[in-house]
Amino acid sequence: MSDRLPPLTALRAFDAAARHMSFQMAAAELNVTPAALSFQIKSLEEHLGTLLFRRLNRAVELTEAGRVLAPGAKDGFEALSLAWRAARRINDSGSVTVTAGPAFTSKWLAPRLFDFARAHPEIELKFSASLRIVDLERDEIDVAIRFGLGPDTGLHSVPLDDEWITPVMTPELAERYPTPESLKDAPLIIDDSVDFLSLSTDWATWFRANGIDHTPQHGIHFSQPDHAINAAVSGAGVTLGRNTLVQHDISTCRLLAPFRIALGTKARFRILCQEGLEDRPNIKAFREWILRQASEMEDLTQNHTILDVSEV
């Protein structure tokens, strides 16, 4: 028996039929007639020398040979499709597909995108605001922006500035609560999204860093940081804002960060891409733009004393 592979059209017909367990549905997927699909599968069986399907009255089922072949055919076409898309993307310098969390997308990226569009009108940006763990190759993502401690094994990773938190509030509330001690009586907004960090950066820790023995018992809880920040912008209370996410609201005077003490989180936002693709012109342009924008946050950092949470 020859090991020569049969035509790909026949293997594709078999793969579709094995996935659907229906010649009619497989034919519809491949945009051919059921008769044409049946002919392809019959030619494949002749090439192999054995049946791959048992034809029943109104259904089909795989034979033992079909069950052996089906996983390999499915994986093979998926790998081929993945490689083809990756090869096409190599020559695509006109777009960048980015995934970032909803908070980073809305509070950091969105207010700045006009600047990127003005500097790089030749590059189309495509965004997926999601915290879902992605496979950059399989999901056709060029750049991922993620927050945490890492590690980023097997990826090219460039960190943004250190992340720290400090109380932020509207100018009106800043007048009512002018000292750290006065925040004991303020309505507090609690961002639960940082609970995964091994070192606590909660309100009790911040009060302790200011020499105040106070553990708040009540507050408005949000699972997403942008929701907590938006609530603070509305005047609902005071939240511990992460410098990256509150910088734009502070620069536009919608929020103030009036107290000098801040807590370092040790976590960072990182810009991730596949190893070896970091110097593709579109990816490099986007990465360098983000780093330039991030450098604007240095003034905010210089106005605060950032404490190591492990020493508080």
Image (cartoon, rainbow, N blue to C red):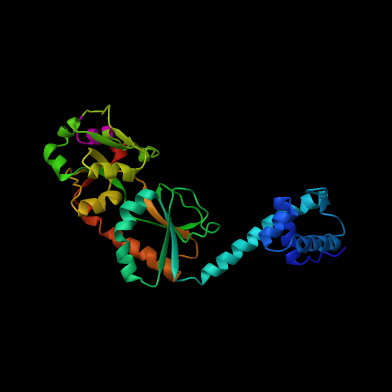
Quarter residue 181 falls in: top left
Residue 108 appears at what percent x and percent y?
Answer: 31, 54
Q: Is residue 154 above or below residue 266?
A: below
Residue 209 appears at what percent x and percent y?
Answer: 23, 36
- Is 99 or 303 nearer to us in this picture? 99
Q: What secondary structure predominates along the stretch shown in magenta?
A: helix
Q: Left or right: where does residue 47 sit relative to residue 97? A: right
Total tally of numbered discs in the picture: 0
Q: Is residue 41 above or below residue 94?
A: above
Q: Quadrant of the N terminus?
A: bottom right
Q: Quadrant of the C terminus?
A: top left
Identify the residue at horizontal 37%, vertical 52% (top origin): 269
Q: Is residue 245 above or below residue 45?
A: above
Residue 286 appears at what percent x and percent y?
Answer: 38, 65
The answer to whether residue 263 of the structure is visible from this angle is no
Quarter residue 192 falls in: top left
Q: Is residue 59 above or below residue 2?
A: above
Q: Left or right: where does residue 108 sit relative to residue 253? A: right
Q: Left or right: where does residue 239 sit relative to residue 267? A: left
Identify the residue at horizontal 64%, vertical 63% (top origin): 80
The answer to whether residue 197 of the structure is visible from this angle is yes
- Is 138 or 170 nearer to us in this picture? 170
- Is 299 or 238 nearer to us in this picture? 238
Residue 8 part of the magenta-drawn span? no
Residue 242 appears at what percent x and percent y?
Answer: 29, 46
First to last magenta residue range: 204-212
Identify the residue at horizontal 60%, vertical 61% (top origin): 82
